[in-house]
Image (cartoon, rainbow, N blue to C red):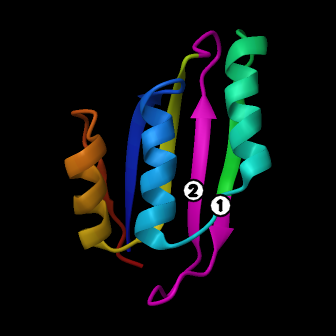
């Protein structure tokens, strides 16, 4: 299984990623968590934060897919997103749309 990771500006690119994840995987993300991410970006400018945006089984995957978000201390406008336990073709799709120029593809041979 592989994972996709990227960092995004919360008020801009993150919205597009949310829509694409729901469309592409045909899942519904935790709306209350997404609302909290946007709210925290405006109200809490200092604290490091971790979010579990989705966790569950997806058809054709042997493991639970997980989507996590992290916001670093004093970096309230940027979120680091990681989609875990997906196929390489899925990683390629998201890299084409949302690549931040870093090494976004991480393979795990387990």
In the rendered image, the quadrant that contains the C terminus is bottom left
Going by the image, does 30 lie left or right of 57? Answer: right
Relative to 44, does residue 61 appear above or below in the rendering? below
- Crowding near the residue tagged with mark 2, few <14, some 14–19, many ≥20 C-alpha atoms within 10 Å: many
Looking at the rendering, in which quadrant would you find the N terminus? bottom left
**Residue at (72% x, 55% y) in the render:** 30
Pointer 2 and pointer 1: residues touching (CB < 8 Å)?
yes
The residue that mark 1 highlights is 54
Tell me: residue 52, above or below residue 57.
Answer: above
Residue occupying image coordinates x 25% and y 60%: 93
**Horizontal arrangement in the rendering, residue 3 relative to residue 78 (left or right):** left
Q: Which secondary structure lies at badge 1?
A: strand
Q: Name the residue rendered at 45%, 26% in the picture.
A: 12
Residue 44 in view in this figure: no
The quadrant where residue 99 appears: top left
Query: In what element is the residue under mark 2?
Result: strand
Question: What are the residue bounds of the magenta stretch?
Answer: 54-76
Q: CA distance from mark 2 to mark 1?
A: 5 Å
Residue drawn at (57%, 70%) of the image: 27
């Amino acid at each position: 299984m592989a994972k996709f990771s990227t960092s995004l500006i919360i008020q801009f690119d993150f919205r597009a990623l949310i829509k694409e994840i729901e469309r592409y995987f045909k899942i519904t993300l935790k709306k209350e968590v997404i609302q909290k991410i946007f709210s925290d970006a405006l109200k809490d400018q200092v604290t490091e934060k971790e979010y579990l945006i989705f966790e569950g089984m997806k058809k054709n995957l042997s493991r639970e897919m997980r989507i996590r978000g992290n916001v670093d201390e004093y970096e309230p406008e940027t979120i680091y997103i990681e989609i875990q336990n997906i196929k390489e073709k899925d990683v390629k799709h998201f890299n084409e749309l949302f690549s931040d120029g870093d090494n976004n593809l991480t393979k795990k041979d387990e």
